[in-house]
Image: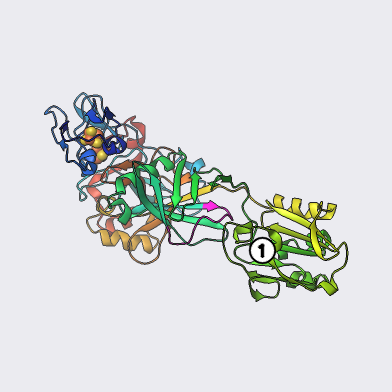
Amino acid sequence: MKIDPDKCKGCGLCEEVCPLSVITVRDKKAAIGLGCVECKTCMKVCPEAAFTPEAPADHPMCTSCPIMCRIPEGGRGACMRYSNKKGEIVRLSRVHSYEEVVDLVREGTGAGPIGTPLITGIGSGTTYPDFRPSPFIVSGVKDGVDIVTVVTEAPLSYSGVKLKVDTDLHVGEEGKKIYVRRKGKRHIGHLCTEEYGSKILSLGGVNILTSKDGLFAARVLHEFLQGKKINVEVEDGTKLELALGMEPEIGGIVEERMRVGCGSATTGLFAPYMFDAADEVIVLDGHITGLFSEHPSGRYLGKPRSPIQLTGQKSTEGRYFLNKGSGWGGTDIVNPLDAIKDVDRTSCFDGMTLLITETTGRRSAFYRWKKDRFVENAPTAEAIRFLDVLKDSCELSRVSAVFAAGVGGSARAGVTKNPIELTRAVHDGKVSVTIGGARPFIFPGGGINFLVDVEKIKHGSIYVSPTPSFVLPVEYTMTLDTFREIGGHIEAVRPVEEVLKKKDGGR
Ligand code: SF4
Ligand code: SF4
């Protein structure tokens, strides 16, 4: 790759996206160092058209994906999987057996002979163009049945990640865009529907990966999948710091606990403790706020109805919808007493107690009625006991993620000459699909669209290629009879022992 220094304005976009980090910008001019593989990622983002392809003749071409890297001796391709060793393009990792990942995927072997693969796609490499057989098609015998596993590392352009962020804190309105700052603001996803107290972020996906910000989105998501911390912001300005398996930081607050339920569920779950905790307990929650003495659980236990009326829209007895916001429990209530619409003062008595808490117990306040108003006070031992039980019942907040993808070209044509037969056999339960040994959820309907827990996939076995796409290990396991029926590449089958006994996987 050549760069025209007169055209370069030093914006740094190429330096940001170069998958091999061989570009440096100094004194407002970009320069290309050793190791360039002609992947053309820099060309795609340069606003000044300063790059021109120029591959030295002795750099062999990797043909495992449409990028067609020209890799110099000792260097790596743009996806970091292939290298040039003495003029030959080789996959850097060996193919992994299922036994090597079984502790990670924790699936057990309850699904019969085709329930688990003979080998995994981890380290297997990719064949391209699509119609060629997958790199490893192996046969073996399980429970007396002849089975076949076909593996590949599938480039998945139609893919993205759904993040589950455990928090009651307000992160923004559903549908808002999510950005990262990488040499400017990059659109990488959007906020999905909230699911029972966890916020779901949809990042990547085919439309974003193929947009002008796609290369940036792929890079950020790959960093996240490798366990790095990423900083994103929602369209309305909320900033989130997220790392896989860690507690999320939202607007500068580290979220420690995940709710045990909504305000109404919390009221029902802990009613016996609430009974002793105060004359009235309000559980503030952006989904459903609970008012204990009016709630069925309070009435069932014989709690006298307090003179407190709540603000918000009443759903059913003791269950209220308050406005959402960045206040307590994901409501817009900043001062907890503002949750009270009205109090029948004639029924109040000096010393009457009130406890207001969030569903996690992270914030709570205890009050006593004095003359004509509630005054904040130290909580009673019973109130502390309830709050302790509530906090202890909350799981730790974390960021979890599933990879969402659909297998397409090489990941299906590498198995069979009739891809539709493979898809049908998957939906008929005749073929099991695993991702690095982990069992995904396959969406109903057409296609092989799946969700898989990324933490069950061996660390470091998801790659990104600058098409852009993610590269994931995929395995198909079926009986030899099914393999024949669906038109599998029978000529490419090798005994599994042959593949596993060779250090290089018998490439
Ligand atoms: S062609 Fe690829 S490897 Fe070479 S400088 Fe550009 S982005 Fe980097
Ligand atoms: S991105 Fe990877 S698979 Fe694609 S051509 Fe380059 S080295 Fe080969």
Residue in the picture at 75% in, 53% down:
387
**Magenta stretch containing residue 171, yes or no?**
yes
Q: Element under label 1?
A: helix
Q: Which span is picked out in magenta?
A: 165-176
286 or 113: nearer the eye? 286
Q: Which residue is mark 1?
A: 263
Where residue 307 appears, x then y in whole percent? 79, 72
Q: Residue at x 74, y 73 (%)?
A: 296
Q: Position of residue 143 (x, y in %)?
A: 45, 50
Picture quarter with the N terminus? top left
Viewer-closest of 351 and 494: 351
Visible residue check, residue 353: yes
Q: Nearer the viewer, residue 48 or 127?
A: 48
Measured as percent of width and height from the top left, residue 423 is found at 32, 61
Q: Amino acid at mark 1?
A: Gly
For label 1, the crowd category at 10 Å Cα-Cα, with few meaning under 14, some 14 to 19 and many 20 or more, is many
Which one is in front, 314 or 53? Answer: 314
Q: Residue furthest right?
A: 350
| Cβ at disc 1 under 8 Å from ligand 2 | no
Question: Is residue 118 visible in this depiction of the protein?
Answer: no
For residue 503, side relative to residue 395 (left or right): left
